[in-house]
Image (spheres, helix red, strand yellow):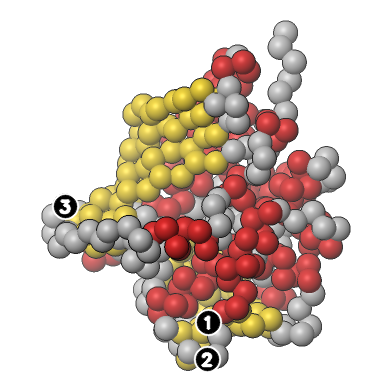
Amino acid sequence: MMEKVRLTQLSKSAGCAAKLSPQILSEVMGKLPGFQDENLLVGVETSDDAAVYQISEELALIQTLDFFPPMVDDPYTFGQIAAANAMSDIYAMGGEPKIALNIVAYPNCLGTEPLEAILSGGASKVKEAGAVLAGGHSINDEEPKYGMSVTGFVHPEKVWKNYGAKPGDLMILTKPLGTGLVNTAVKADMASKRAMEEARNSMTTLNKVAKEVFSDFPVHCCTDVTGFSLAGHGLEIARASNVTLEVWAEELPVLWEALDYAAMGLVPEGTYRNKNFQKQEVRLEAEISEAMEDLIFDPQTSGGLLVCMEEQYAREALKTLKDRGIATPAAIVGQVKEKGAYFLEVCSR
């Protein structure tokens, strides 16, 4: 029998923490040629979650792609997380996933069993989403990587974008923060069983229910919180909307022991990349601890939706989320204010 493989020991970074620096991406993307098409409703201009292309008066196509190295040792769970993360961009645009294609990098020397488990895990989440898996592409690589290219559908007039937040709006976050910190502790063999289970449950949960709930309310803007952290994705909303987001640190849902791991220095490299590029536009109150600061900039894998809407709807939507029994805790985590000196302010309440 083949010796059990620890996938996390084969990867240099875990999950979305493996993303390139946002500073590098910003510099490179700024030098690429622009593309114009009257049917392209959402492109690269606002760093949104996916591209949206209008097909007809009632149909628009959402296209996204995402893949990364392992953040858990179990191959099946890794496949589930990667698929949930890839389809999250479709939900963040207000759409429904329809077609998925696998993207696989895998060492031939590991044999077929782990690969079969990874792909089976991904397929299970595609089926749960009500989409179809229709093939993919693979290469031999020393470091395993897995993800998907996903196509979804949405009505052209019901696309959620990562801009449009208005002063007075409240912000809802649908999943707890800290996956980067917990995954780093996993790689160091220092994560508790409860911390690993909470992180796994969060990362494998589709944003499907959250999207269904929010579809019944007037959403001003939406994004999912992934590798560029709560701060980074919040800044994208604030810049594009020309507002300031006030984040209430004490209201943030946090994974079990994530702040403890931050205090111990178990911080992913992606956190420091995010800080270097984002921190000059963020004001942190003096009372905010260094561990909380690390959480704010922590790269998330398969994170939750961050939604802005009017206060009355936000409170009703939050109640509905809890009534639907959403698997991970959702919370109102801040408010939108008129543009101030900073795009993002983190404070205690």
Three-letter code, disc 3: Ile
Quadrant holding the C terminus: bottom right
Which residue is at a point 56% across and 85% down the rendered structure image?
342
Q: Where does label 3 land, which residue? A: 55
- In whole angstroms, how far apart are the C-alphas of marks 1 and 2? 7 Å
In this view, 241 is above or below 323: below
Quarter of the rendering containing residue 275: bottom right
For disc 3, the neighbor class at 10 Å (few under 14, some 14 to 19, many from 20) is: some
Quarter of the rendering containing residue 278: bottom right
Residue 201 in the figure: left or right of residue 223: right
Give residue 190's mark.
Answer: none
Q: Which label's residue is closer to the chain start, 2 or 3?
A: 3
The picture places residue 171, in percent across and down from the top left corner, at 53, 75
Quarter of the rendering containing residue 273: bottom right
Give residue 343's mark.
Answer: 1
In this view, 147 is above or below 176: above
Q: Which label's residue is closer to the chain start, 3 or 1?
A: 3
